[in-house]
Image (cartoon, rainbow, N blue to C red):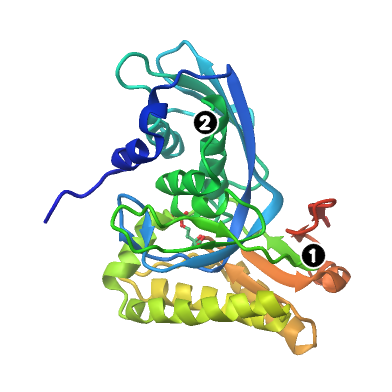
């Protein structure tokens, strides 16, 4: 087998000499929205570079996301605050972040260490795509700090090295992550779709904000290696992507909802049949699913999707807001395409 590229090779390819620029500012801050996949990314063809087996498609979550502020400081290690609480630098959370930043420090003469302040408006690691918006904000803040002037494609590509789904958090709205076919992944990044859907709502139903039992990275790999149903996943995704794009183009909400919900359930079916089995679903998740199905039987157009955690994200249109709030008073409603009121907290 020939030489397999690592993350640093990709950073060198993209940044070139810019890698050695000194900071242009003392500090930089950037907010990136979280994104929820309507057609999921589940399985990597390259573990090191986070290259996916399939393409995927997401919608961003308005003002739900993470703001990251990077300040260059004189210490010889990073200091991290998450929602004003100091983070232990030996924790998994800190290690992932520091490993990512290690890709962008100067090597020859002087390394930059940072004071990192993260403000997250979503629970961390509960399947609400907190790592996606975190890594997207970090790369955006670095781009401002060092004045790299990278394109959105390049930013997306670099964010992908932190966490796959982060490449869909560089842009807002509907974003398609094209899997690409190159071995170095230079054609694998998120691309914003031009279509908008102002009436579209995403309702967050949080059953648990505890850290998830198994990181999606490990769960994906276990699924790819052991689930007897994984072979069916890539062709299912191909079909679902066609249906989703059609639904977005034609504003066919029931097609969008049905495709997103069945895609999420199919992803969970591959995990449940992995060995050892992977279950993120809690009894509360099932009971919320049953309520959603009942609401649908009663004529309300509401669907859900679920990621690597127990929480559900409901999909519905603006005209259903009051009915949804009646059924789920605790729901947190986001309107991804309504720039004025990005987020309505119903509780
Ligand atoms: O980017 P990761 O490694 O956090 O994986 C994301 C996996 C899912 O959220 C389950 C699916 C997706 O496409 O976001």
Q: Secondary structure at mark 1?
A: loop
337, above or below 231, in the image: above
Residue at the outermost left position: 1
Image quadrant containing the C terminus: bottom right
Q: Which mark is residue 198?
A: 1
Task: Give 203 or 177, whichever is nearer the viewer.
Answer: 177
CA separation in Å, label 2 and label 1? 31 Å
Residue at image coords 50%, 66%: 56
Residue 81 at x, y = what percent?
Answer: 57, 28
Is the residue marked by circle 1 packed among few (<14), some (14-19), or many (20+) residues within 10 Å? few
86, above or below 129, in the image: above
Q: Which mark is residue 103?
A: none
- Quadrant assignment, res 288: bottom right
266, above or below 18, in the image: below
Residue 173 at x, y = what percent?
Answer: 67, 58
From the image, tell me which residue sits under label 2: 142
Q: Secondary structure at mark 2?
A: helix
Residue at image coords 36%, 38%: 11
Asked if the residue under mark 1 is in contact with the one under mark 2, i.e. CB atoms within 8 Å, the reply is no
- Quadrant assignment, res 141: top right
Going by the image, does 170 lie left or right of 336? left
């Amino acid at each position: 087998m020939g030489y397999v590229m690592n993350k640093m090779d990709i950073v060198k390819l993209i940044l070139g000499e810019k890698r050695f620029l000194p900071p242009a500012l003392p500090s930089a801050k950037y907010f990136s929205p979280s994104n929820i996949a309507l057609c999921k990314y589940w399985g990597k063809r390259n573990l090191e570079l986070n290259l996916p087996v399939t393409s995927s498609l997401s919608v961003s979550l308005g003002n739900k996301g993470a703001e990251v502020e990077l300040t260059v400081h004189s210490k010889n290690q990073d200091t991290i605050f998450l929602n004003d609480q100091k983070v232990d630098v030996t924790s998994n959370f800190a290690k992932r972040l520091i490993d990512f930043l290690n890709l962008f420090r100067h090597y020859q003469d002087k390394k930059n260490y940072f004071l990192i302040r993260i403000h997250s408006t979503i629970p961390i690691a509960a399947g609400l795509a907190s790592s996606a918006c975190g890594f997207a904000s970090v790369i955006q803040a670095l781009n401002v700090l060092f004045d790299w002037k990278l394109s959105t494609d390049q930013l997306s590509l670099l964010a992908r090295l932190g966490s796959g789904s982060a490449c869909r958090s560089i842009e807002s709205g509907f974003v398609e992550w094209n899997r690409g076919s190159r071995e170095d992944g230079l054609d694998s990044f998120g691309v914003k779709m031009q279509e908008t859907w102002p009436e579209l709502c995403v309702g967050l139903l949080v059953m648990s904000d505890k850290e998830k039992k198994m990181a999606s990275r490990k769960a994906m790999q276990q699924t790819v290696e052991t689930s007897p149903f994984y072979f069916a996943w890539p062709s299912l995704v191909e079909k679902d992507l066609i249906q989703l794009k059609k639904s977005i183009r034609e504003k066919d909400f029931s097609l969008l909802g049905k495709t997103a919900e069945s895609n999420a359930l199919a992803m969970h079916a591959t995990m449940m049949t992995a060995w050892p089995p992977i279950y993120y679903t809690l009894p509360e998740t099932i009971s919320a699913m049953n309520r959603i199905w009942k609401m649908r039987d009663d004529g309300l157009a509401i669907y859900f999707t679920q990621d690597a955690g127990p929480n559900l994200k409901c999909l519905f249109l603006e005209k259903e807001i009051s009915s949804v709030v009646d059924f789920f008073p605790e729901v947190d409603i986001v309107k991804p395409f309504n720039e004025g009121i990005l987020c309505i907290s119903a509780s």
